[in-house]
Image (spheres, grey):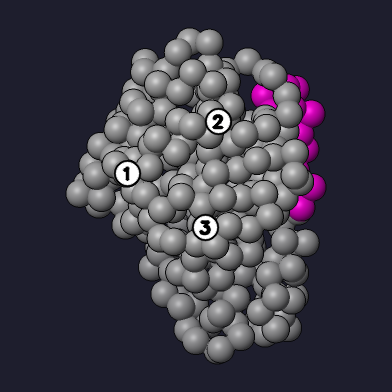
Amino acid sequence: MRILLTGATGFIGKSLKKKLSNKSFNIVALSRRKHKDKDNIKYIKDSIRLNNKFHIINKFDPEVVIHLSWEGIPNFSNLVLTKNLKDQKIFFKKISLLKSLKKIIVTGSCLEYKNRTGKCKENGRLTNLNDLGKTKIELFKFIKKTINSKINLYWLRLFYIYGRNQRKGSLIPLLINSAIKKRPLKLKNVYNSHDYIHVDDLSSVIKKLLKKNIKSGVYNVGYGKSISILSIIEILEKLLNKKINFKSYEKSKKFSFYSCNDKIKKNLKFIPKINLKKGLKELINKNE
C-alpha cells in the first residue's frame, strides 16, 4: 500500500511509523527538514503547501493520505491557526488532483465539540467558541467539499493523547518531570476531567483504517472514560513513590467529558489496550 504521510516526525507520527514498519506499507513522508530514508519510508523535504516536490508525490501515486501535520503546537493563536488553515487548504487542493487516491485519514480534535460534560458522540453539537475547534471544523468541511466523493474520508476527533515522544510541556511529561526533579507546579484546575488515550492505541486505529474499508465520516478516538488531573497526580505519586508539589488556581470542576467509542468499536472492532496506569508506568520507566 502506497501512503503519503504528513507529520511523520511528530509525536503521533513516530508511534505510527513503528506500527507501519511492515514492508507492505510503502511510505513517502513529507517534512520541512531533511531526513534520511529508513526501511520502508522515503522522506521528501517540502512545506505543507507542496511548492517544490508535488511532482514526486504525483509520480508516487499514493493510495492513502494520512495527515497528522499541525504547525506551531501548542501555540493556538489566531495568527497560527489562520496560517495552518490556509496552508492545509492548499495542500488538500493539490492532493485532490491525485487520481490514485482512495482514502484520506485526518486528525481532528475533541475541542470541536461544544459540550464539555459527559459522553461525546460524533453527532454532538459543534463549537462556535473554541478557536482550534472552529479551525478544525472549517478544514473538515473544506476537505469534504474539495475531494472526489469516491474517496473515503476519515476524520478522527482525538481526545487527550499521551505517550512516548510527547512534547515536554504537555501535562503528563510535566507532572513526571516535576516529581523526579522536585519542582513545584502551577496548574490551572486539577479537578477537570478528560479522556486520555495512549498514542499507540491511536496508531492502532489508523492502521485498522488502512486495512478495512468502512464508511467515510467522523470517528471519535478516546479511551472512553474521563479522569481528573488530580487522580492522575495521585497515580503518578504512587508509581514514583514521590510527592508532586502543585498549586491549582481554580478549585471546582468545569470540564468532565469523554469519548463515545461505539462507532470505532462497531466498525473497526477496536478497544483500547493500554490503560492509563500501564501507560504512565511505561513513561516513568523511560524517564528513570
What is the secondary structure assignment of the residue under circle 3? loop
Looking at the image, can residue 141 be seen? no
Q: CA distance from mark 2 to mark 1?
A: 17 Å
Could you say which disc has been placed on residue 9 in the image?
A: 3
Query: The disc labelled 1 sits on which kind of residue?
Result: Asn
Viewport quadrant of the N terminus: top right
Identity of the residue furthest to the bottom in this view: 182
Between disc 1 and disc 3, the foreground one is: 1
Q: Residue at x 35, y 28 (%)?
A: 94
Which x, y percent locates residue 262?
70, 26
Where the C terminus falls, by quadrant? Answer: bottom right
Residue at point 49%, 71% (across, down) = 168
Q: Amino acid at mark 3?
A: Thr
Quarter where residue 162 is shown = bottom right
Return the residue at label 2. Answer: 62
- Which callout, 1 or 3, points at the residue further toward the start of the chain? 3
